[in-house]
Amino acid sequence: MATGDVDRNIGARIRIERESRGWSLTELATRAGISRAMIHKVERGESSPTAQLLGKLSGAFGLSMSTLIARAETGEGRMLRAADQPTWTDPETGYVRRHISPKSELPLDLVRVTLPAGAHVPMPASAYAFARQLIWVLEGELVFIEGAVRHEMACGDCLELGPPMDCAFANESAADCTYLVALLTTA
């Protein structure tokens, strides 16, 4: 799927989520702490949303970021072949997110992330309010900053996230880092 198509699908999904709640652009902007103009551009597919922006929007909807993006990207069926797994790239950091799990009623999503060398992706606590997560480092090194706690992770390390709080994913090394996020939706 081309980047423009992904941006349009995510924007359309955000509009659907907003309208299904009966919210105006102004109400969503207030709930998410994002400008009304930015939401309008994203909904129209005129701007590529960043990971931080998607985290704020998903939190406002009471969804995990993974659920929001999955609703925009994945089709029906119990099998999601590798060639059909949707990817999304954060235009700000180059963070590449691949949705691995098929769309289903299971409260579990699997996401593979490649975080470029030197990248730092902050996430608001609201992005984690309705999910429990594990992070498993597949390649490279990851620093996960959870509030004031810094977790330095190497290949093979697995971390269960604590209660929702502002956090950040950082790759302080000179090589890309790849990790898997297993997300269990609790709401």
Image: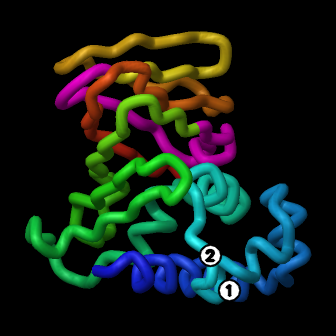
Callout 2 secondary element: loop
Q: Nearer the viewer, residue 40 or 176?
A: 176
Q: Nearer the viewer, residue 131 or 92?
A: 92
Left or right of 81? Residue 126 is: right
Q: Which quadrant holds the C terminus?
A: bottom right
Across and down, in percent, residue 96 comes to 35, 53
Callout 1 secondary element: helix
Mark 1 — residue?
20
Residue type beneath disc 1:
Ser
Total marks placed = 2
Q: Does residue 159 appear in the picture of this structure?
A: no
Real-space Cα separation, disc 2 to disc 1, in angstroms? 22 Å
Mark 2 — residue?
47
Segment tinted magenta in the rendering: 122-141
Q: Nearer the viewer, residue 24 or 95?
A: 95
Across and down, in percent, residue 20 comes to 68, 86
Across and down, in percent, residue 31 comes to 84, 61
